[in-house]
Structure formats: structure tokens, C-alpha cells
Amino acid sequence: MKTTLLNRSPIWFNCFIYFGILLLMALWVPELSEDPLLGRIKYTIFACILMVIPAVLTYLFRTIGPRIAYTSNVLWLFSFFLFLFHAYLTIFVYFGGIRESIDGQGDVIGILNMILTVWWILNIILLFTVGLMNRGIRFQHALLMLAIIVAFLFTVLRRTGSVFSFGVLVSIVLMTGIIVYFIVLRKSTPATIPRLS
């Protein structure tokens, strides 16, 4: 018997396990450092990016089928949860509030971070309610993914040591995925992308 329904349970389970491992590592590894709070802030954004990368790459390859497209949406949602954890630690625990956070990061970077946060919240709401069926919604979704990656790379590629190395690794993985996309799947017909709900 052929079924057209997408079995979503394994996708949610696998993404949740990946999310859980990243979150636990982001909380546990800094315990070994001199400043656990600053370490948690750094490692939660690393964990977020480690979840954003597969979300972006599966989004590029969503034309393969609805399972890949749906996996991208679930990964994107869990990366948002990791980002919220990072934002909470940064804004409320480290800086002590929204105004203090903007002042501490500088007006431009602080306000851009707030804009990206609000945009990501609206994007998640659209994923749950409308999905990515509309071309305009797909465009803003892709633009948000690009903005988050650029903001992350702009931050880490100005650093030195392991943070810089992590940024280079992320860049290589993303560029490889984009090259494969343009070589192999660029002209594929878009798959139907189900809503998250």
C-alpha cells in the first residue's frame, strides 16, 4: 500500500537527539574553563551554528523530496532554540538586560542582533502557519539563513585561534554544499515543503 503521508516522528526524534547533544556539550564543556558563563555563551552559538549548517544544506537540497525539506525546517527550529538559549545567556545573564546588551555590544551590532532575533521569531511562526510554499516566504527564509551565516562568519573570522579555525571549517562545509547544489540540483523541480505543524 502506497502512502503519501510523510512520517515525521523519526525526523523530530533525530533532530531532537542532535539538539540535545549539542546543548549538553555547550553547557558541559565550559565547566572546564576559567569563565564558565562566557564559555557557555560562546559554545551555545557554536552549537547553534552546528545546527544551522545542516538546516541550510538540507534547505538547498529540498528539491529532492518533502522529507529533506521537512528535515530542514525541523533543524531550523531546533537551531532557533539553541539561539534563544545563547541570547538568554548573553542578554539577561551576562549583560543584565536588553538596553545593557545593546550598550555592551555596541549600538550597531546590538541592534542588528535584535533585528535578526525578531526576524527569526517571525520566520519560525511562518514555518508553522504557512510553510514555505510562497516564493516570497522562501526568499525571506533564504535571506535570513544567509544573514545569520554572514553575521556569524563576520564575528568568528575576525578572531584568532580555535574560533577562527571553526569559522574556516564552517565556511568550507557551506561552500562545498553550495558548489554541489549548483553542479547537481540547481535545475530540479521544487518539492512540496510541508508546514512544521
Image: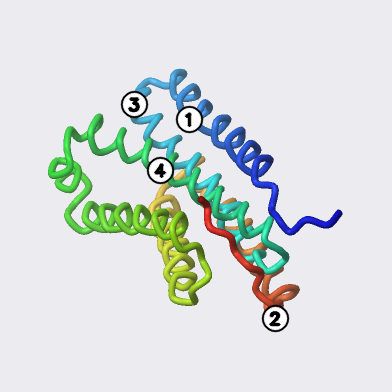
Q: CA distance from mark 4 to mark 2?
A: 33 Å
Mark 2 sits on what residue?
187
Where does label 1 land, which residue?
A: 26
Is disc 1 in contact with disc 4, using a CB cutoff of under 8 Å? Answer: no
Q: Separation of disc 4 and disc 3 at Cα?
A: 15 Å
Mark with earlier residue (2, 3): 3
Q: Amino acid at mark 2?
A: Lys
Kindly indicate whether the residue at mark 3 contacts the one at mark 4 (C-beta within 8 angstroms).
no
Q: Quadrant of residue 43?
A: top left
As shown in the figure, which amino acid type bears the numbered disc 4?
Answer: Phe
Q: Please tell me which of labels 1 and 4 falls first in the chain.
A: 1
Q: Out of 11 and 89, give the one closest to the viewer.
A: 11
Q: Is residue 119 above or below residue 46?
A: below
Q: CA distance from mark 2 to mark 3?
A: 46 Å
Q: Position of residue 55 (x, y in %)?
A: 57, 54
Binning the other alpha carbons within 10 Å of mark 1 as few (below 14), some (14 to 19) or many (20 upward) gives many
C-alpha span from label 1 to label 4: 12 Å
* SS state under label 4: helix
Answer yes or no: do the residues labelled 2 and 1 have beta carbons within 8 Å? Answer: no
Mark 4 touches mark 2? (CB < 8 Å): no
Location of mark 4 (residue): 83
